[in-house]
Amino acid sequence: MADIRYVIVSDLHFGAENSVLTMLNERPSTTTDTGFSVDPQRPSPVLSLVIDGLRKLIGDQDKPPTLILAGDILDLALSPDNLSAMTFRHFARLAFGTGRPVFDSVVHYLPGNHDHHLWEATRETQYTDYLTSQSADAELVIPWHTTRLLPTAEQPTATSILLTGLIRSQPGCEGVDVRVSYPNMALRTPDERRCLIVSHGHFTESIYSLMSTLKDTLYPGQRASGYEDIETLEEENFAWIDFFWSTLGQSGQVGTDMGMIYADLTSPADIDALVSNLTRAMLAKGKGPAWLHPAELWAVNTIFQREANHVATSERGTPSVTLTPQGQAGLRGYLAGPILKQLQDEWRQIPEEVTLVYGHTHKPFVYRWPVAGFPQPVRIYNTGGWVVDTAQPAPVQAGTAVLVNDQLEAASVQFYRQEAANAPSPVTLLPPAEGDSPSAWHEELASRIDPAAEPWASLAESAAQLVAQRHRLQAATVAIRNFSRPSDAR
Protein backbone atom coordinates (compact mmCIF):
# COMPACT_ATOMS: atom_id res chain seq x y z
CA MET A 1 0.00 0.00 0.00
CA ALA A 2 1.56 3.31 -1.12
CA ASP A 3 1.49 6.15 1.37
CA ILE A 4 -0.34 9.39 0.74
CA ARG A 5 2.57 11.82 0.83
CA TYR A 6 0.78 15.12 0.12
CA VAL A 7 -2.80 16.36 0.42
CA ILE A 8 -3.59 19.47 -1.65
CA VAL A 9 -6.73 21.55 -1.08
CA SER A 10 -7.74 25.08 -1.99
CA ASP A 11 -10.60 27.58 -1.94
CA LEU A 12 -11.84 26.66 1.52
CA HIS A 13 -12.93 30.29 2.09
CA PHE A 14 -13.11 29.94 5.85
CA GLY A 15 -15.41 32.59 7.28
CA ALA A 16 -17.44 33.12 4.11
CA GLU A 17 -21.18 32.66 4.49
CA ASN A 18 -21.35 30.77 1.21
CA SER A 19 -18.63 28.25 2.17
CA VAL A 20 -19.97 24.87 3.25
CA LEU A 21 -16.96 24.69 5.60
CA THR A 22 -18.32 27.66 7.59
CA MET A 23 -21.12 27.07 10.09
CA LEU A 24 -24.22 29.27 9.71
CA ASN A 25 -27.19 30.26 11.84
CA GLU A 26 -30.42 30.52 9.86
CA ARG A 27 -33.56 32.47 10.70
CA PRO A 28 -36.42 33.95 8.63
CA SER A 29 -35.15 36.50 6.14
CA THR A 30 -36.47 40.05 5.63
CA THR A 31 -36.30 42.55 2.80
CA THR A 32 -33.10 43.94 4.27
CA ASP A 33 -31.49 40.85 5.82
CA THR A 34 -30.78 37.41 4.37
CA GLY A 35 -31.54 35.64 7.63
CA PHE A 36 -28.09 34.03 7.74
CA SER A 37 -25.09 34.74 9.94
CA VAL A 38 -21.78 33.01 10.54
CA ASP A 39 -21.56 30.93 13.72
CA PRO A 40 -17.83 30.94 14.50
CA GLN A 41 -18.24 28.87 17.68
CA ARG A 42 -19.24 25.64 15.93
CA PRO A 43 -17.47 23.69 13.18
CA SER A 44 -19.34 22.88 10.00
CA PRO A 45 -20.39 19.19 9.92
CA VAL A 46 -18.93 18.99 6.40
CA LEU A 47 -15.57 20.19 7.72
CA SER A 48 -15.61 17.59 10.50
CA LEU A 49 -16.56 14.76 8.15
CA VAL A 50 -13.95 15.73 5.53
CA ILE A 51 -11.26 15.51 8.21
CA ASP A 52 -12.70 12.14 9.33
CA GLY A 53 -12.57 10.93 5.72
CA LEU A 54 -8.97 12.00 5.23
CA ARG A 55 -8.03 10.32 8.51
CA LYS A 56 -9.61 7.09 7.26
CA LEU A 57 -7.85 7.33 3.87
CA ILE A 58 -4.48 7.85 5.50
CA GLY A 59 -5.04 4.93 7.84
CA ASP A 60 -2.07 3.79 9.87
CA GLN A 61 0.75 4.84 7.55
CA ASP A 62 3.98 5.52 9.45
CA LYS A 63 4.17 9.23 8.66
CA PRO A 64 1.22 11.55 8.10
CA PRO A 65 1.12 13.39 4.76
CA THR A 66 2.14 16.98 4.24
CA LEU A 67 -0.75 19.41 3.83
CA ILE A 68 -0.55 21.94 1.00
CA LEU A 69 -3.05 24.80 1.20
CA ALA A 70 -3.30 26.20 -2.33
CA GLY A 71 -4.88 29.57 -1.68
CA ASP A 72 -8.14 31.27 -0.70
CA ILE A 73 -8.02 29.56 2.67
CA LEU A 74 -9.25 32.63 4.57
CA ASP A 75 -11.93 34.70 2.87
CA LEU A 76 -10.34 38.07 3.58
CA ALA A 77 -11.98 39.82 0.61
CA LEU A 78 -15.56 39.65 1.86
CA SER A 79 -15.44 38.29 5.41
CA PRO A 80 -14.31 39.95 8.66
CA ASP A 81 -10.91 38.75 9.79
CA ASN A 82 -12.16 37.47 13.15
CA LEU A 83 -14.78 35.20 11.57
CA SER A 84 -12.27 33.77 9.09
CA ALA A 85 -9.75 33.20 11.89
CA MET A 86 -12.21 31.52 14.25
CA THR A 87 -13.45 29.21 11.50
CA PHE A 88 -9.87 28.31 10.58
CA ARG A 89 -9.22 27.39 14.22
CA HIS A 90 -11.87 24.65 13.99
CA PHE A 91 -9.98 23.20 11.04
CA ALA A 92 -6.69 23.41 12.95
CA ARG A 93 -8.09 21.65 15.99
CA LEU A 94 -9.74 18.87 13.97
CA ALA A 95 -6.72 18.26 11.73
CA PHE A 96 -3.85 18.63 14.21
CA GLY A 97 -5.16 18.53 17.76
CA THR A 98 -7.82 15.82 17.96
CA GLY A 99 -6.28 12.38 18.42
CA ARG A 100 -3.54 11.44 15.98
CA PRO A 101 -2.73 14.40 13.68
CA VAL A 102 -3.98 13.96 10.14
CA PHE A 103 -1.08 15.96 8.70
CA ASP A 104 2.63 16.48 9.26
CA SER A 105 3.72 19.40 11.44
CA VAL A 106 5.12 21.35 8.45
CA VAL A 107 2.34 22.83 6.31
CA HIS A 108 2.88 24.53 2.95
CA TYR A 109 0.66 27.46 2.07
CA LEU A 110 0.29 29.35 -1.22
CA PRO A 111 -1.85 32.48 -0.83
CA GLY A 112 -4.56 33.09 -3.40
CA ASN A 113 -6.32 36.25 -4.50
CA HIS A 114 -8.74 36.30 -1.54
CA ASP A 115 -5.99 35.86 1.05
CA HIS A 116 -3.22 37.60 -0.90
CA HIS A 117 -2.73 40.00 1.99
CA LEU A 118 -1.18 37.16 3.99
CA TRP A 119 1.56 36.94 1.36
CA GLU A 120 2.20 40.68 1.69
CA ALA A 121 2.52 40.31 5.46
CA THR A 122 4.80 37.30 5.05
CA ARG A 123 7.13 38.83 2.48
CA GLU A 124 7.53 41.99 4.56
CA THR A 125 8.50 39.87 7.56
CA GLN A 126 10.81 37.78 5.39
CA TYR A 127 12.48 40.91 4.02
CA THR A 128 12.89 42.27 7.54
CA ASP A 129 14.59 39.02 8.55
CA TYR A 130 16.92 39.43 5.58
CA LEU A 131 17.73 43.07 6.41
CA THR A 132 18.53 42.39 10.03
CA SER A 133 20.82 39.50 9.12
CA GLN A 134 23.10 41.67 6.96
CA SER A 135 26.26 43.43 8.05
CA ALA A 136 26.22 47.14 8.81
CA ASP A 137 27.63 48.17 5.41
CA ALA A 138 26.24 45.36 3.20
CA GLU A 139 24.76 46.13 -0.21
CA LEU A 140 21.04 45.43 0.22
CA VAL A 141 18.81 43.92 -2.47
CA ILE A 142 15.44 45.43 -3.27
CA PRO A 143 12.36 43.67 -1.83
CA TRP A 144 11.23 40.64 -3.82
CA HIS A 145 7.66 39.68 -4.68
CA THR A 146 7.81 35.91 -5.19
CA THR A 147 9.51 32.86 -3.73
CA ARG A 148 11.58 30.17 -5.38
CA LEU A 149 9.90 27.01 -6.62
CA LEU A 150 11.50 24.68 -4.08
CA PRO A 151 10.65 25.64 -0.47
CA THR A 152 14.07 24.37 0.63
CA ALA A 153 15.72 26.98 -1.63
CA GLU A 154 14.01 29.89 0.09
CA GLN A 155 16.26 31.83 2.49
CA PRO A 156 15.26 33.16 4.90
CA THR A 157 12.30 30.87 5.39
CA ALA A 158 8.94 32.46 4.62
CA THR A 159 6.48 31.65 7.42
CA SER A 160 2.88 32.74 7.90
CA ILE A 161 2.83 34.21 11.40
CA LEU A 162 -0.96 34.39 11.36
CA LEU A 163 -1.76 30.83 10.25
CA THR A 164 1.04 29.35 12.35
CA GLY A 165 -0.20 31.26 15.39
CA LEU A 166 -3.82 30.27 14.86
CA ILE A 167 -2.92 26.59 14.60
CA ARG A 168 -0.58 26.69 17.59
CA SER A 169 -3.28 28.37 19.68
CA GLN A 170 -5.22 25.10 19.66
CA PRO A 171 -4.45 22.36 22.23
CA GLY A 172 -2.06 19.74 20.87
CA CYS A 173 -1.00 21.86 17.88
CA GLU A 174 2.01 23.61 19.40
CA GLY A 175 4.65 22.31 16.96
CA VAL A 176 2.97 23.13 13.63
CA ASP A 177 4.76 25.51 11.25
CA VAL A 178 3.12 27.03 8.15
CA ARG A 179 5.68 27.75 5.38
CA VAL A 180 4.71 30.09 2.56
CA SER A 181 5.41 29.90 -1.18
CA TYR A 182 4.06 32.37 -3.72
CA PRO A 183 2.70 32.14 -6.32
CA ASN A 184 4.16 28.77 -7.40
CA MET A 185 5.72 25.87 -5.49
CA ALA A 186 7.31 22.73 -6.87
CA LEU A 187 8.02 19.19 -5.69
CA ARG A 188 10.27 16.85 -7.64
CA THR A 189 11.45 13.27 -7.46
CA PRO A 190 15.09 12.54 -6.49
CA ASP A 191 16.00 11.71 -10.10
CA GLU A 192 14.49 15.11 -11.16
CA ARG A 193 12.57 13.47 -14.02
CA ARG A 194 9.16 14.26 -12.58
CA CYS A 195 7.87 17.37 -10.84
CA LEU A 196 4.56 18.58 -9.47
CA ILE A 197 3.82 22.31 -9.39
CA VAL A 198 1.20 23.84 -7.10
CA SER A 199 -0.32 27.29 -7.62
CA HIS A 200 -3.53 28.98 -6.62
CA GLY A 201 -4.08 29.93 -10.26
CA HIS A 202 -5.47 33.47 -10.20
CA PHE A 203 -2.90 34.60 -12.77
CA THR A 204 -4.64 32.38 -15.32
CA GLU A 205 -7.32 35.12 -15.49
CA SER A 206 -6.55 38.51 -16.99
CA ILE A 207 -8.26 40.60 -14.30
CA TYR A 208 -5.36 39.83 -11.95
CA SER A 209 -2.84 41.36 -14.35
CA LEU A 210 -4.94 44.48 -14.94
CA MET A 211 -2.15 46.89 -13.96
CA SER A 212 0.21 45.29 -16.47
CA THR A 213 -2.48 45.69 -19.13
CA LEU A 214 -2.96 49.34 -18.19
CA LYS A 215 0.78 49.97 -18.35
CA ASP A 216 1.12 48.41 -21.79
CA THR A 217 -1.90 50.34 -23.09
CA LEU A 218 -1.00 53.76 -21.69
CA TYR A 219 2.77 53.45 -22.19
CA PRO A 220 3.36 51.18 -25.18
CA GLY A 221 6.89 50.26 -26.07
CA GLN A 222 8.26 50.25 -22.52
CA ARG A 223 8.21 46.47 -22.30
CA ALA A 224 10.46 44.45 -24.56
CA SER A 225 8.65 41.11 -24.64
CA GLY A 226 5.48 40.76 -22.59
CA TYR A 227 5.47 40.00 -18.87
CA GLU A 228 6.11 36.26 -18.76
CA ASP A 229 8.45 36.71 -15.78
CA ILE A 230 6.46 35.83 -12.66
CA GLU A 231 8.37 38.31 -10.48
CA THR A 232 7.47 41.19 -12.83
CA LEU A 233 3.87 40.05 -13.08
CA GLU A 234 3.43 40.09 -9.31
CA GLU A 235 5.46 43.28 -8.83
CA GLU A 236 3.18 45.18 -11.20
CA ASN A 237 -0.11 43.79 -9.88
CA PHE A 238 0.31 42.97 -6.18
CA ALA A 239 -1.22 46.23 -4.91
CA TRP A 240 -4.26 45.82 -7.15
CA ILE A 241 -4.80 42.22 -6.09
CA ASP A 242 -4.30 43.08 -2.43
CA PHE A 243 -6.76 45.98 -2.54
CA PHE A 244 -9.68 44.65 -4.52
CA TRP A 245 -9.47 40.93 -3.83
CA SER A 246 -7.92 40.49 -0.39
CA THR A 247 -8.45 43.34 2.08
CA LEU A 248 -12.00 44.57 1.46
CA GLY A 249 -13.31 42.37 4.26
CA GLN A 250 -11.45 44.69 6.65
CA SER A 251 -13.34 47.72 5.33
CA GLY A 252 -16.44 47.61 7.54
CA GLN A 253 -19.68 48.26 5.68
CA VAL A 254 -17.74 48.68 2.43
CA GLY A 255 -16.68 45.04 2.69
CA THR A 256 -20.28 43.99 3.16
CA ASP A 257 -21.44 46.13 0.26
CA MET A 258 -18.83 44.58 -2.01
CA GLY A 259 -20.78 41.33 -1.78
CA MET A 260 -23.60 43.11 -3.56
CA ILE A 261 -21.18 44.50 -6.17
CA TYR A 262 -19.83 41.02 -6.86
CA ALA A 263 -23.39 39.84 -7.42
CA ASP A 264 -24.12 42.83 -9.67
CA LEU A 265 -21.28 41.83 -11.99
CA THR A 266 -23.68 39.39 -13.61
CA SER A 267 -25.71 42.35 -14.95
CA PRO A 268 -24.41 44.24 -18.04
CA ALA A 269 -26.24 47.40 -16.96
CA ASP A 270 -24.73 47.26 -13.50
CA ILE A 271 -21.27 46.68 -14.97
CA ASP A 272 -21.61 49.85 -17.07
CA ALA A 273 -22.68 51.87 -14.02
CA LEU A 274 -19.93 50.41 -11.81
CA VAL A 275 -17.16 51.15 -14.31
CA SER A 276 -18.41 54.67 -14.95
CA ASN A 277 -18.60 55.43 -11.23
CA LEU A 278 -15.18 53.90 -10.60
CA THR A 279 -13.50 55.93 -13.35
CA ARG A 280 -15.09 59.19 -12.23
CA ALA A 281 -14.16 58.52 -8.61
CA MET A 282 -10.53 57.83 -9.54
CA LEU A 283 -10.31 61.10 -11.42
CA ALA A 284 -12.05 63.08 -8.67
CA LYS A 285 -9.65 61.70 -6.05
CA GLY A 286 -6.67 62.48 -8.27
CA LYS A 287 -5.91 65.62 -10.24
CA GLY A 288 -9.25 65.93 -11.97
CA PRO A 289 -10.11 64.93 -15.56
CA ALA A 290 -7.42 67.20 -17.00
CA TRP A 291 -4.57 64.98 -15.85
CA LEU A 292 -5.49 62.44 -18.54
CA HIS A 293 -5.69 63.22 -22.23
CA PRO A 294 -9.03 62.27 -23.86
CA ALA A 295 -7.45 59.24 -25.51
CA GLU A 296 -6.02 58.11 -22.16
CA LEU A 297 -9.36 58.63 -20.41
CA TRP A 298 -11.04 56.55 -23.10
CA ALA A 299 -8.39 53.84 -22.70
CA VAL A 300 -8.80 53.67 -18.91
CA ASN A 301 -12.58 53.44 -19.16
CA THR A 302 -12.38 50.86 -21.95
CA ILE A 303 -9.91 48.67 -20.07
CA PHE A 304 -11.94 48.77 -16.84
CA GLN A 305 -15.06 47.99 -18.86
CA ARG A 306 -13.41 45.00 -20.51
CA GLU A 307 -11.92 43.65 -17.31
CA ALA A 308 -15.16 44.06 -15.35
CA ASN A 309 -16.87 42.01 -18.03
CA HIS A 310 -14.07 39.45 -17.66
CA VAL A 311 -15.00 39.18 -13.98
CA ALA A 312 -18.63 38.67 -14.94
CA THR A 313 -17.60 35.91 -17.35
CA SER A 314 -14.80 34.53 -15.17
CA GLU A 315 -14.46 30.85 -14.43
CA ARG A 316 -16.13 31.25 -11.05
CA GLY A 317 -18.83 33.38 -12.69
CA THR A 318 -19.49 30.78 -15.41
CA PRO A 319 -20.86 27.74 -13.56
CA SER A 320 -22.20 26.05 -16.69
CA VAL A 321 -18.91 24.67 -18.08
CA THR A 322 -15.83 23.15 -16.47
CA LEU A 323 -13.40 25.53 -18.17
CA THR A 324 -14.34 28.22 -20.68
CA PRO A 325 -12.30 28.81 -23.88
CA GLN A 326 -10.99 31.99 -22.22
CA GLY A 327 -10.01 29.96 -19.15
CA GLN A 328 -8.28 27.36 -21.29
CA ALA A 329 -6.28 30.06 -23.06
CA GLY A 330 -5.31 31.66 -19.75
CA LEU A 331 -4.21 28.33 -18.29
CA ARG A 332 -2.12 27.47 -21.35
CA GLY A 333 -0.60 30.94 -21.30
CA TYR A 334 0.36 30.66 -17.64
CA LEU A 335 1.97 27.26 -18.17
CA ALA A 336 3.82 28.23 -21.35
CA GLY A 337 4.78 31.66 -19.96
CA PRO A 338 5.49 32.32 -16.25
CA ILE A 339 5.73 28.68 -15.12
CA LEU A 340 7.95 27.55 -17.99
CA LYS A 341 10.23 30.56 -17.53
CA GLN A 342 10.49 30.01 -13.77
CA LEU A 343 11.47 26.37 -14.36
CA GLN A 344 14.10 27.42 -16.90
CA ASP A 345 15.48 30.22 -14.73
CA GLU A 346 15.75 28.19 -11.53
CA TRP A 347 16.43 24.64 -12.77
CA ARG A 348 17.95 25.25 -16.23
CA GLN A 349 15.89 22.35 -17.55
CA ILE A 350 12.29 21.19 -17.86
CA PRO A 351 11.52 17.82 -16.20
CA GLU A 352 10.27 15.07 -18.48
CA GLU A 353 6.94 14.78 -16.64
CA VAL A 354 5.18 17.82 -15.20
CA THR A 355 1.93 17.95 -13.24
CA LEU A 356 0.16 21.18 -12.29
CA VAL A 357 -2.31 21.36 -9.39
CA TYR A 358 -4.27 24.57 -9.02
CA GLY A 359 -7.62 25.84 -7.77
CA HIS A 360 -9.29 29.27 -8.04
CA THR A 361 -12.06 28.32 -10.49
CA HIS A 362 -14.07 26.19 -8.02
CA LYS A 363 -14.68 23.69 -10.86
CA PRO A 364 -12.53 20.55 -10.52
CA PHE A 365 -11.22 18.57 -13.46
CA VAL A 366 -8.38 16.31 -14.56
CA TYR A 367 -6.78 17.16 -17.93
CA ARG A 368 -3.76 16.07 -19.93
CA TRP A 369 -2.62 18.75 -22.37
CA PRO A 370 0.29 19.22 -24.75
CA VAL A 371 1.78 22.61 -23.86
CA ALA A 372 4.47 24.45 -25.82
CA GLY A 373 7.89 24.11 -24.21
CA PHE A 374 7.16 20.94 -22.22
CA PRO A 375 8.61 17.62 -23.42
CA GLN A 376 5.43 15.65 -22.65
CA PRO A 377 1.77 16.56 -22.13
CA VAL A 378 1.18 18.26 -18.78
CA ARG A 379 -1.26 16.62 -16.36
CA ILE A 380 -3.50 19.28 -14.78
CA TYR A 381 -5.62 18.83 -11.66
CA ASN A 382 -8.03 21.49 -10.46
CA THR A 383 -8.94 21.29 -6.78
CA GLY A 384 -12.41 22.83 -7.10
CA GLY A 385 -13.86 24.90 -4.28
CA TRP A 386 -16.13 24.85 -1.25
CA VAL A 387 -18.46 27.80 -1.83
CA VAL A 388 -21.90 27.99 -3.38
CA ASP A 389 -22.23 31.05 -5.61
CA THR A 390 -25.69 30.55 -7.11
CA ALA A 391 -29.31 30.10 -6.02
CA GLN A 392 -29.60 27.00 -8.23
CA PRO A 393 -27.29 23.96 -8.37
CA ALA A 394 -24.19 24.31 -10.56
CA PRO A 395 -23.15 20.69 -11.19
CA VAL A 396 -19.64 21.59 -12.38
CA GLN A 397 -18.80 23.08 -8.98
CA ALA A 398 -17.40 20.68 -6.40
CA GLY A 399 -14.88 20.32 -3.59
CA THR A 400 -11.94 17.96 -4.00
CA ALA A 401 -8.55 17.12 -2.57
CA VAL A 402 -5.62 16.02 -4.71
CA LEU A 403 -3.70 13.14 -3.10
CA VAL A 404 -0.07 12.59 -4.11
CA ASN A 405 2.31 9.71 -3.40
CA ASP A 406 6.12 9.63 -3.11
CA GLN A 407 6.50 9.29 -6.89
CA LEU A 408 4.38 12.43 -7.34
CA GLU A 409 1.51 10.49 -8.88
CA ALA A 410 -1.74 12.35 -8.24
CA ALA A 411 -5.41 11.46 -7.91
CA SER A 412 -8.40 13.68 -7.11
CA VAL A 413 -10.98 12.75 -4.45
CA GLN A 414 -14.33 14.51 -4.88
CA PHE A 415 -15.93 15.10 -1.49
CA TYR A 416 -19.09 16.79 -2.73
CA ARG A 417 -20.65 18.12 -5.92
CA GLN A 418 -23.69 20.31 -6.45
CA GLU A 419 -26.41 18.05 -7.85
CA ALA A 420 -29.83 18.75 -9.37
CA ALA A 421 -32.53 19.07 -6.71
CA ASN A 422 -29.71 19.14 -4.12
CA ALA A 423 -29.44 15.38 -4.13
CA PRO A 424 -26.49 13.88 -2.20
CA SER A 425 -23.41 13.32 -4.33
CA PRO A 426 -21.39 10.23 -3.37
CA VAL A 427 -17.74 10.68 -2.43
CA THR A 428 -15.71 9.32 -5.31
CA LEU A 429 -12.38 9.42 -7.10
CA LEU A 430 -12.39 11.48 -10.29
CA PRO A 431 -11.42 9.44 -13.36
CA PRO A 432 -7.95 9.89 -14.91
CA ALA A 433 -7.40 12.40 -17.67
CA GLU A 434 -8.56 11.50 -21.14
CA GLY A 435 -5.87 9.34 -22.72
CA ASP A 436 -4.60 8.02 -19.38
CA SER A 437 -5.38 4.56 -18.05
CA PRO A 438 -6.05 4.21 -14.31
CA SER A 439 -2.72 3.81 -12.55
CA ALA A 440 -2.11 1.36 -9.75
CA TRP A 441 -2.10 4.38 -7.43
CA HIS A 442 -5.51 5.51 -8.69
CA GLU A 443 -7.00 2.04 -8.34
CA GLU A 444 -5.59 1.62 -4.85
CA LEU A 445 -7.14 4.88 -3.66
CA ALA A 446 -10.46 3.98 -5.27
CA SER A 447 -10.47 0.71 -3.32
CA ARG A 448 -10.20 2.64 -0.05
CA ILE A 449 -13.45 4.56 -0.64
CA ASP A 450 -16.82 2.84 -0.17
CA PRO A 451 -19.41 5.63 -0.66
CA ALA A 452 -22.00 3.64 1.32
CA ALA A 453 -19.71 3.34 4.36
CA GLU A 454 -18.93 5.90 7.04
CA PRO A 455 -17.89 8.66 7.10
CA TRP A 456 -18.51 8.94 3.36
CA ALA A 457 -22.29 8.39 3.49
CA SER A 458 -22.79 10.99 6.23
CA LEU A 459 -20.52 13.41 4.37
CA ALA A 460 -22.63 13.16 1.22
CA GLU A 461 -25.85 13.80 3.17
CA SER A 462 -24.42 16.71 5.17
CA ALA A 463 -22.90 18.33 2.09
CA ALA A 464 -26.24 18.15 0.25
CA GLN A 465 -28.01 19.82 3.19
CA LEU A 466 -25.46 22.61 3.50
CA VAL A 467 -25.39 23.20 -0.26
CA ALA A 468 -29.19 23.58 -0.21
CA GLN A 469 -28.84 26.04 2.67
CA ARG A 470 -26.32 28.09 0.68
CA HIS A 471 -28.72 28.13 -2.28
CA ARG A 472 -31.31 29.68 0.06
CA LEU A 473 -28.69 32.22 1.15
CA GLN A 474 -27.94 33.17 -2.45
CA ALA A 475 -31.65 33.48 -3.28
CA ALA A 476 -32.14 35.80 -0.30
CA THR A 477 -29.12 37.87 -1.34
CA VAL A 478 -30.52 38.30 -4.87
CA ALA A 479 -33.92 39.28 -3.47
CA ILE A 480 -32.37 41.97 -1.27
CA ARG A 481 -30.30 43.29 -4.15
CA ASN A 482 -33.36 43.53 -6.39
CA PHE A 483 -35.36 45.20 -3.63
CA SER A 484 -32.60 47.75 -2.98
CA ARG A 485 -31.94 48.64 -6.63
CA PRO A 486 -33.60 51.94 -7.61
CA SER A 487 -36.43 51.54 -10.10
CA ASP A 488 -36.48 53.28 -13.48
CA ALA A 489 -39.23 55.55 -12.17
CA ARG A 490 -36.82 57.08 -9.70
Image (cartoon, helix red, strand yellow):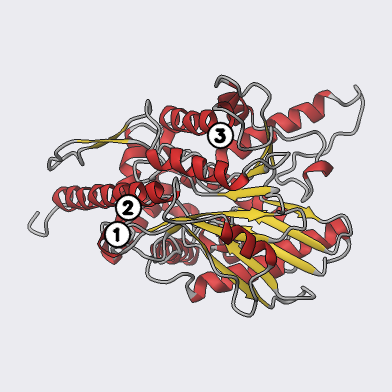
State the image coordinates of residue 243 (x, y, percent, origin top left): 50, 43
Label 3: few (<14), some or many (≥20) within 10 Å?
many
First in sequence: mark 2 or mark 1? 1
User: Looking at the picture, which amino acid does disc 1 mark?
Assistant: Ala
Mark positioned earlier in the residue sequence (3 or 2) = 3
Tell me the element at label 3.
helix
Q: Residues within 10 Å of mark 1 (few under 14, many from 20)?
A: some
- First in sequence, mark 1 or 3: give its number: 3
Decide which of 319, 141 is in the foreground and name it. Answer: 319
Q: Is residue 137 left or right of residue 18?
A: right
Q: Disc 3 residue type? A: Ala
Is any atom of residue 378 visible in this view? yes
What residue would you read off at disc 2? 464
Q: Is residue 9 left or right of residue 374?
A: left
Nearest the camera: 374 or 408? 408
Query: For mark 1, what is the residue?
Result: 423
* Residue at x 54%, y 31% (from the top left corner): 92
Is 224 positioned to the left or the right of 214 in the image?
right
1 or 362: nearer the eye? 1
